[in-house]
Amino acid sequence: MPLIEVRKLVKAYGMQPVLRGIDLDIERGQSVALLGVNGGGKSTLIRLIAGLTPPTSGTITIGGWSLPREADAIRAQIGLVAHRTLIYDNLSARENLRFFGQLYNLSDLDARIGEGLARVGLAKRADDMTRNFSRGMQQRLAIARALLHDPPVLLLDEPYTGLDVEAAAILDQIVLTARAEGRIILLTTHEIERAARLTDKVVILVKGRIGYEGAMPTDLMATYRALIGGEPTETSLPLS
Amino acid sequence: MKTGFFKAAFAIAAKDFRAELRSRELISSMGLFVLLSVLIFSFALELNRQARAEAIGGVLWVTVVYASILGLNRSMAMEREQGNFEALLIAPIDRSAIYIGKLIGNTAFTLAVALPLMPLMTILYNVATITPEVIVVILLGTFGVTVIGTLLAAMTVQTRSRETLLPIIMLPIVLPSLLAAVRATNAILSRAPAAQWSDWIVILVVLDIIYFALCLVTFRFVMEE
């Protein structure tokens, strides 16, 4: 039985449909790349699965719990990393993690914070204000925050935006480790090569529908071009 | 794993206090506004003692309300800048706890600049403003302003024109509380008998309860999109 089940999911903002009937199953331990053009519905799908926005119609169940009825139970199963870091500039790394740990009602918080910071290589900067961190360090802290409550599902919404090569390589390693730990990873990105390296399943959204879903193809770029008709960059596809 | 309502609310309020202790962005901007505002009014209103006592309630509440708008915008901007509202919304907590947490912080920050107004105005206007009755009115009136303001600031923070939009939609809604607070303050400072201002305090209490209940229920729906 898949851990994440999405059925006939539709999301529209006013009269503008963004997702037009998505059916998607993700098994425990699967690592999935979610590809598509800007405005194609990738981030909306992530936000729907995270329970941040309600669907227009359709259902999402995670671990047997359904949204939005059992949203609190589902939220505890999810870690979210977005292109924005979701951390507080005027708090230290440790204080940020402590605050979010309190929101998740975690026991052994000090130990978890220590482990989390060590995992992302920020143990020595634990008490520094995050406003003094580089973009890469902030994003690593964002990963530590997302993994603090040990969620089985990690949603990564364009986490590589604005990262330099070195910071992106560190993030790659963290994602691969999370994958090896058996977590579901749902990654949206425009970097085809990175998606091919980090994930084992691909979903390509085309005009709000799934254009391709399956195991990682031998030539992901060719598959993508055949569906979208171009490079996965800043192109914008009309939805109607 | 769902966190207790009050535990979550207090964690959010404590986070706001800690962040403000570091940056002092809220208190400094609100405090400077309050100081300048009261000074300007004191030069503008060179009136006799009776006229000053009658004007002082209006000066106090205009100053408090605009200072609170400054603070509310800044407080919510802190949640918006790095997308932190999403981090709060994805946590397994009751969404109303986010409202209570922000409300505690916003009320405390507004009171932190509103209460020192009393000795300042006593000196500048030569009217004894430090009385238990005035303190009660300030507590009730400030709560009424921040109860509405916290909800509306959460709604407007995602818009581009949030700084101008918040006062436009907030002031008409808090007007009943403001009127009651001004009338009560003026009556107390004019040493009118309790019968002349006690009804205004009752109105303030009733309005605070109604606003609080409505905002608490509404907040979760505001946060849906």
Image (cartoon, grey):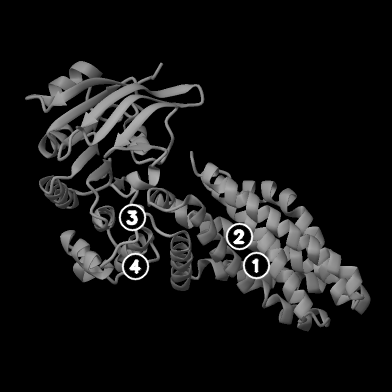
Chain letter for mark 4, please. A
Discs 1 and 2 carry the same chain letter: yes
> Where residue A8 sits: x, y (%)?
34, 22
Look at discs 1 and 3 and give the one toward the viewer.
3
User: Which residue is at 70% across, 75% downward?
Assistant: B117
Residue at mark 1 to residue at mark 3: CA–CA distance: 43 Å
Look at discs 2 and 4 and give the one toward the viewer.
4
User: Which residue is at 6% across, 25% downward?
Assistant: A218
> Where residue A163 sits: x, y (%)?
24, 48
- Contact, mark 2 vs mark 4 (Cβ under 8 Å): no
User: Which residue is at 43% across, 52% downward?
Assistant: B81
- Residue type at mark 3: give it: Met
**Which residue in the structure is indicated by mark 4?**
A95
User: Which residue is at 25% across, 68% downward?
Assistant: A108
Discs 2 and 4 carry the same chain letter: no
Which quarter of the figure has residue A140? bottom left
Residue at mark 4 to residue at mark 1: CA–CA distance: 30 Å
Which quarter of the figure has residue B188? bottom right
Q: Which numbered dot is residue B1?
A: 3
Of the two numbered discs 3 and 2 on the same chain, state the one appearing first in sequence.
Answer: 3
**Which residue in the structure is indicated by mark 1?**
B33
Task: Say above or below: A156 vs B111.
Answer: above
